[in-house]
């Protein structure tokens, strides 16, 4: 396991685009990782695509169920632009079918809510190394 100094070096100046339509969920993510990473916030998939193109974040945390454009469609569009950006699906739905759909859309990983803070941090670090 890496020490905290190594994790801080990895996270220095890294930007994460959090795509989440529920403010309390965004605030929870901000509390868990906001001191480690610079966070950008998109309220829906359409905003996520626009913010991705403008900001070029290092990683995306993508909620699946959202208004205007869901996370799966946003992931497909972002994948047309970049195959490299790590996208981690976040969802309250823990069904195997949802996991398969997220991975087929182009998500690199899949985490279910309520989120485990240590697992979230480990998963992010895995993709930012």
Image: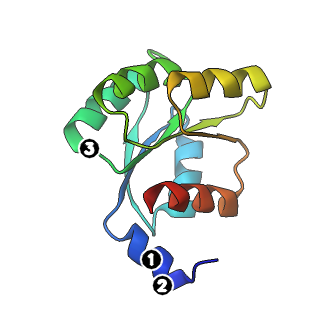
What crowding class fits label 3: few (fewer than 14 Cα within 10 Å), some (14-19), or many (20 or more)?
some
> Vertically, is 82 above or below 16?
above
The secondary element bearing badge 1 is classed as helix
Q: CA distance from mark 1 to mark 3?
A: 21 Å
Labels 2 & 1 near each other (Cβ < 8 A): yes
**Quadrant in the picture for the C terminus:** bottom left
Sequence-first tag of 2 and 3: 2
Of all residues, the one furthest to the left in this rendering is 54
| Rendered image quadrant of residue 112 | top right
Residue 14 in which image quadrant: bottom left
Q: Residues within 10 Å of mark 2 (few under 14, many from 20)?
A: few
Q: Earlier in the sequence, mark 1 or mark 3?
A: 1
In this figure, which residue is indicated by the disc labeled 1? Answer: 8
User: Crowding at label 1, few (<14), some or many (≥20) Cα neighbours within 10 Å?
Assistant: few
Total marks placed: 3
Of the 4 image quadrants, the one containing the N terminus is: bottom right
User: Horizontally, is 29 left or right of 73 in the view?
Assistant: right
Q: Are marks 1 and 3 in contact (CB under 8 Å)?
A: no
Indicate the colouring scheme: rainbow
Please give left or right for residue 57 compared with residue 43 in the image.
left
Question: Is residue 64 left or right of 17 when viewed as pictured?
Answer: right
**Nearer to the camera, 43 or 105:** 105
- Could you say whether the residue bearing mark 3 is in a helix, strand or loop? loop
Question: Which residue corresponds to mark 3?
Answer: 56
Could you say which quadrant of the image residue 13 lies in? bottom left
The residue to which callout 2 is attached is: 5
């Amino acid at each position: 396991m890496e020490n905290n100094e190594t994790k801080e070096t990895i996270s220095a100046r890294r930007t994460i685009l959090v795509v989440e339509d529920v403010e309390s969920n965004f605030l929870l993510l901000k509390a868990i990782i906001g001191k480690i990473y610079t966070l950008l916030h998109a309220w829906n998939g359409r905003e996520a695509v626009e913010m991705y193109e403008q900001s070029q974040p290092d990683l995306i945390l993508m909620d699946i169920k959202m208004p205007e454009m869901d996370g799966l469609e946003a992931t497909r569009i972002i994948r047309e632009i970049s195959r490299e950006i790590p996208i981690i699906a976040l969802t309250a739905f823990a069904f195997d079918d949802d996991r398969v759909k997220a991975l087929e859309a182009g998500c690199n990983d899949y985490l279910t809510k309520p989120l485990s803070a240590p697992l979230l941090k480990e998963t992010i670090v895995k993709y930012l190394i």
